[in-house]
Image (cartoon, helix red, strand yellow):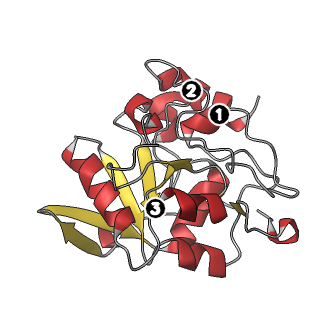
Amino acid sequence: MDRRDYLAALGVAGLAGLAGCSALSGRDGLSDDPPADCGVPESFAANRGALPADETPADGIPPAVDGDPPSHEVDPDVFPTATVDGVDVRLAPVGVAHYWWRRGAARFADARRRDAYDGAHVYGAVWSPADTTDASAACDPIDYWPDGDRIVCYGGGTDGYGRQRAAALAAADYDEVYAIRHGFPTWRRAGHPVAGRDVDPADTTG
């Protein structure tokens, strides 16, 4: 049983007891399957190196890697917040975001422009731009995700895209939305899993 099947089988009640994890519905929680390429550009798995293949990329849940980290308490109430268009957005430290990534406990969304995503992105993250004027973003996989699942957005650090996308989702009644504090640059500097056309496959580890 892979991690997505495990999350779906365990259900909301079981997941509530996992420290630092909230309920993810898994693919069984999707009302309809998004189109296969929805939010998944050709660069999705480019140069992923030794990272495992992602068989269901549009769900935003990272593929399972060897060795889940030990469970520990995460209290989002202590996260700093940023107010965007009147909406308070919780800013997850990059270490917490990576912990959720390793445990398959969040769906990840890249809110930057397409060229930035293509160059390098969190492996497993879909492309869901904050700038909705981008004509190539005709399909957004988040539209198919359960509104009770944990979603982690990120931008480029100084562009504010991650916070903007998280605020828009919160305003649309998604219950548990975060932006990575300081965005994708902190993720990449920390050596966390990435893919993309500008990525050295030798650097892609879990």
Q: How many marks?
A: 3
- Location of mark 1 (residue): 4
Disc 1 marks a residue whose amino acid type is Arg
Which mark identifies residue 27? 2
Q: Measuring 46% from the left and 39% from the top, which residue is drawn there?
A: 23
- Nearest the viewer among 10 and 31 is 31
| In the image: residue 168, left or right of residue 116 | left
Give the mark toward the camera: 3 or 1: 3
Which mark identifies residue 180? none
Q: Measuring 39% from the left and 49% from the top, which residue is drawn there?
A: 134
Residue 102 x, y percent position in the rendering? 66, 56
SS of the residue at dot 3? loop
- Nearest the viewer among 101 and 193 is 193
- Location of mark 3 (residue): 112
Residue 202 x, y percent position in the rendering? 88, 70
What's the CA distance linking mark 1 and mark 2?
7 Å
Residue 107 x, y percent position in the rendering? 51, 46
Image quarter (top left, top right, bottom left or bottom right) of the N terminus: top right
Mark 1 nearby-residue class (10 Å; few <14, some 14–19, many ≥20): many
SS of the residue at dot 2? helix
Disc 3 marks a residue whose amino acid type is Arg
**Quick check: marks 1 and 2 in contact, CB under 8 Å?**
yes
Mark 3 nearby-residue class (10 Å; few <14, some 14–19, many ≥20): many
Which numbered disc flags the more N-terminal residue, 3 or 1? 1
